[in-house]
Image (tube, grey):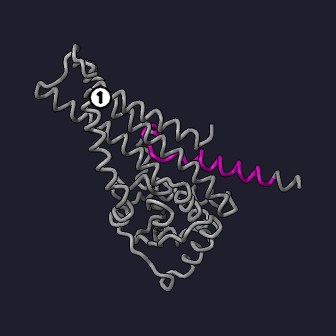
Amino acid sequence: MNNIAKTFLLMAVLTALFMVAGQAMGGRSGMMLALFMALAMNFFAYWFSDKMALAMSRAREVSPQEAPELHAMVTTLSNRAHLPKPRVYIIDQPTPNAFATGRNPHHAAVAVTVGLLHLLSRDELEGVIAHELAHIKNRDILISSIAAVMAGAISYLATMTQWAIIFGMGRGDDDNDGGAGLVGSIVMMIVAPIAAAMIQMAISRSREYLADTTGARICGHPHSLATALQRLEEYNHRRPMPVNPATAQMYIVNPLTAGSMANLFSTHPPIRERIRRLRSLTASANRQEANI
């Protein structure tokens, strides 16, 4: 199953989980209230996600005069990807990393750290920029926002259920509005948010794999992106980057990585697997050239 199909399957599972959790924990009325609240919160987050992410990362926009080589590279790669050129930002951090944000290709931005510009070769930097442009091209911000809507709604349902149980307002087993009773509500209150978080993180990992593949095609040399990922992972292990945890999933490699987070709850796929897939693209391209 390819990453696009896997993403839509996970979204369908997340939607189904939301419907089941809503019926079990709050009945039809509770489900509709939670959905309304989650849509309102995530609508705001979607429209202003780029400004919030850039502000939390303390990124500053740079002009072509301030960073001519970086702007030229972004322009060239954007043209290859058939994308409008995004705004360019720099983060004053020595740890190498990068992220893209924006609700659509016409309202997008790419941010890189000072450390990234100093550490990587030109080809490796092109690979990283191409990966971030791939996120914009694949509309990953939109998909992440939809996943956040559903996961947020489930978490809100769990909170509603918790307070209802505390104040003795839980539904009985004979409730005719679709509730699952006290025991079922407690089980769903615990299980549903964990399952939603796991699915949301699985969606994020699928989008990272897809961005690697798309980015490799944009820059034209998968091996350079693979090498860049390896170098970034090693550096971020030695010197984790101080970031707001809410923005950690946006970066090309996990800036908070320290070997303590289980893969199941990681928003980033294992670097070894990402590198393996990129190198397989290089091998495949070499075989095709040899057969020409």
Q: Is residue 150 above or below residue 162?
A: below
Q: Main secondary structure of the magenta part?
A: helix
Q: Residue at x 31, y 56 (%)?
A: 44
Residue 271: say if magenta.
yes
Image location (x, y in percent) of residue 79: 63, 70
How crowded pointer 1 is (Cα within 10 Å; few <14, some 14-19, many 20+) is rated as some
Image location (x, y in percent) of residue 179: 26, 22
Q: Is residue 231 visible?
A: no
Disc 1: which residue: 190
- Badge 1 amino acid: Ile
Q: Is residue 239 visible?
A: yes
Q: Is residue 61 above or below residue 231?
A: below
Residue projecting furthest to the bottom: 65
Q: Residue at x 62, y 64 (%)?
A: 81
Q: How many marks?
A: 1
The answer to whether 86 appears left or right of 162 in the picture is: right
Image location (x, y in percent) of residue 210: 58, 49
Secondary element at tag 1 = helix
Quadrant position of residue 18: top left
The answer to whether 24 appears left or right of 5 in the picture is: left
Q: Is residue 105 above or below residue 275?
A: below
Quadrant position of residue 48: bottom left
- The quadrant of the picture occupied by the N terminus is top right
Residue 124: say if magenta.
no
Q: Residue at x 38, y 38 (%)?
A: 197
Residue projecting furthest to the left: 167
Between residues 139 and 226, which one lies in front from this camera angle? 139
The answer to whether 265 appears left or right of 105 in the picture is: left
Image location (x, y in percent) of residue 104: 48, 60
Q: Which residues are magenta?
A: 263-286
Residue projecting furthest to the top: 174
